[in-house]
Image (cartoon, rainbow, N blue to C red):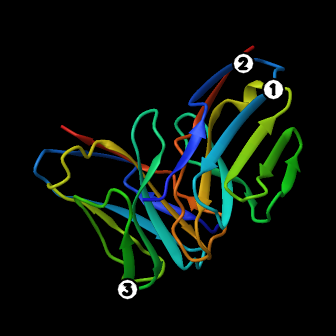
Amino acid sequence: GQQVMQIPQYQHVQEGEDFTTYCNSSTTLSNIQWYKQRPGGHPVFLIQLVKSGEVKKQKRLTFQFGEAKKNSSLHITATQTTDVGTYFCAPTYSSASKIIFGSGTRLSIRP
Amino acid sequence: DGGITQSPKYLFRKEGQNVTLSCEQNLNHDAMYWYRQDPGQGLRLIYYSQIVNDFQKGDIAEGYSVSREKKESFPLTVTSAQKNPTAFYLCASNMGTGELFFGEGSRLTVL
């Protein structure tokens, strides 16, 4: 079935360092969403990207959607301990299809 | 307040028993989803429903069953045919392909 690869699986950074997670698909996406899940919690929506080449920012978070709409990234500048959690991409392959999830990138931070 | 309610939060089951997890939403969303999450893993789609009285299998539907008799309700039955049912189950809903709203989840343990 349709699959998306998300890398890296884990990342452990010093507080204040930057963090990036990538989501790659072999086929064109309709749109892509990003979610954050804190330990023990449920995923919480961060953003949705729809347009080719789209870039959106939320404070220290920058989201990009590739020109070919096959890949996306989430970049966090100057991480803080509140950023700890697992970040998932969730692509949609057509306008009326199911939402699947990438395998996630778990971010841990050294204070 | 609008949202998604899952129950029970914790459930223990003996091998060979069927159990039903409840998911209710008052967001007037058309689509509802069930995901399974194993420890340290991503979310895998079990079943989804885009309209009342209709639902589709996700990637891991074997051993599970659902119904969608009402717009606001999408119960999941974990049958005895599911060989490894211990997991965290998450229900979600959305409109179209927009933001997914998640419930708090149900943790099922097979004794």
In this image, B79 relative to B104: left or right? Answer: left
Up/down of B86 relative to A31, above or below: above
In this image, B101 relative to B91: left or right? Answer: right
Q: Residues within 10 Å of mark 2 (few under 14, many from 20)?
A: some
Q: CA distance from mark 3 to mark 1?
A: 47 Å
* Residue at image coords 47%, 48%: B43
Chain at numbered mark 3:
B
Front in this rendered view, residue B40 or B11:
B40
* Residue at image coords 74%, 24%: A81
Q: Picture quarter containing residue A28? A: bottom right
The amino acid marked with disc number 3 is: Asn
Chain at numbered mark 2:
A
Up/down of B24 relative to B78, above or below: below
Q: Picture quarter containing residue A11? A: top right
Q: Picture quarter containing residue B97? A: bottom right
The amino acid marked with disc number 2 is: Val
Residue at the spot of label 3 = B53
